[in-house]
Image (cartoon, rainbow, N blue to C red):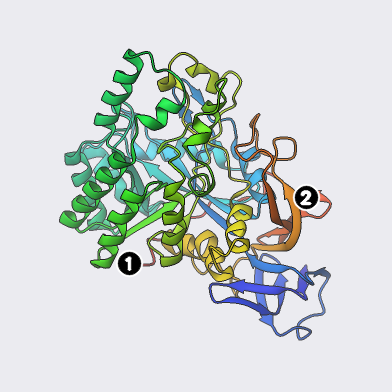
Amino acid sequence: MTTLISGGQVLSTAGASAADVLVDGETIVAVGAPGTLGPADSVIDATGKYVLPGGIDAHTHMEMPFGGTRSVDSFGTGTTAAAWGGTTTIIDFAVQAKGTSLLSTMDKWHEKADGNCAIDYGFHMIVSDVDDSSLKEMQACVDGGVGSFKMFMAYPGVFYSTDGEILLAMQKAREIGATIMMHAENGIAIDQLAAQAFAAGKIDPVQHGLTRPPELEGEATSRAIQLAKVTGAPLYIVHLSASQALAAVAKARDDGQNVFAETCPQYLYLSIEDLAKPDFEGSKYVASPPLREKSHQADLWRGLRTNDLSVVSTDHCPFCFKDQKELGRGDFRAIPNGIPGVEHRMDLLHQGVVAGELTLGRWVETCSTTPARMFGLYPRKGVIAAGSDADIVVYDPAAKQTLSVETHHMNVDYSAYEGMEITGKVETVLSRGRVVVSPSGFTGSTTHGKFLSRGLNQYLN
């Protein structure tokens, strides 16, 4: 089957240009001047619309165990919601439990995801147990298409790694060409602050933010950068939220170090004021790093413009308010950490275009093209070009919508952006040439998505 997408403005990192796109099967076969391609078996009229490469969300947590519960989106529901929002690839985190191997963890995540995804997917590995066995298995993970490894300076007793363990993993990553991804918060100090707050009777959700101050994100980010410098390993800071951390990343990049960072929509739009909402409503906004004072948001937008922040991901980790977030009533430390957002990333970043914070090219770059290059998927993904997978979004930049739990498709009982009015909306989504979202609704299948065996960071090779 051939499909012609005609009349639209095709977006790339360079901006917009009038062009038609011809798809044959799963692949884009031509991008040409309006009216020069075709005929085709079917035609999608994109007049007045943007035609952009499908989004790549490089940071999701589907079915993730945390604090005695698990995130409520399955791979099926989460990837379906992603498709509704114009994301056609996710990269999820396979979580190594203490005492288990990396390869058995990878097998476990394959069992969860294979045959259960509406869009294509890949994995990162979370390394919780740094020992000789895990270090050796890192090469086997790379051979299996997983070339990025996340570590934690937070969550002592669960995911936390010491500086010595981080150094060993970074040395191995340098040897095999892999990228270390870092959750950079000083978890040892944070746990002391949290314990002191609880002992003083301060139990409300806002304490989650107050006991994880931005200075401790900045300090950990700086420490991770120095460890990466000593070892020569590339470093990717996940979910950066604070001006202090951004300053450390910017300096490292100015010095020529291979340091990259992502931020998330929640840090661009939400703040600690949301964490302080009364009647335990603030628990809906508990994530780590926490939401910051609004003053950090201007710095993050500027970081996206200057490329000190290279990628926007969601850290999608949804827990229902009822029965899950409520586990922390009486002790903010027991609130499951995570905010739902995989469905709204493309729309929320388009709001940055509407507001003049980003160009159209930068929207595409941060949400699609750069994550494809960062995680070894380009040019198969992340670009509308002949030979690339036909992962395509037709986007109406003039449509109006209101974000709400009543209309979203994520398997969670609240919206972090309830009532937010935005301009722009996904109209049609193709995943490898198949229309999975159309103006009439979801037309895909949770058996459609395929595992992506990824290469290494293409900014390094």
For image coordinates 43% across by 58% down, the residue present is 375
Q: Position of residue 425 (x, y in %)?
A: 72, 56
Quarter of the picture holding the C terminus: bottom left
Q: Which residue is mark 1?
A: 460
Q: Is residue 434 above or below residue 256?
A: above
Q: Nearer the viewer, residue 278 or 163?
A: 278
Q: Position of residue 188 (x, y in %)?
A: 24, 30
Hey, what amino acid is under mark 2? Thr
The answer to which image quadrant residue 395 occupies is bottom right
For image coordinates 76% across by 58% down, the residue present is 399
Question: Position of 106 compared to 56: left or right?
Answer: left
Indicate the secondary structure of the residue bearing disc 2. Answer: loop
Q: Which residue is mark 2?
A: 443
Hey, what amino acid is under mark 1? Leu
The answer to which image quadrant residue 258 occupies is bottom left
Q: Position of residue 183 (x, y in %)?
A: 34, 42
Quarter of the picture holding the N terminus: bottom right
Q: Nearer the viewer, residue 439 or 176?
A: 439
For image coordinates 26% across by 53% down, the residue present is 173
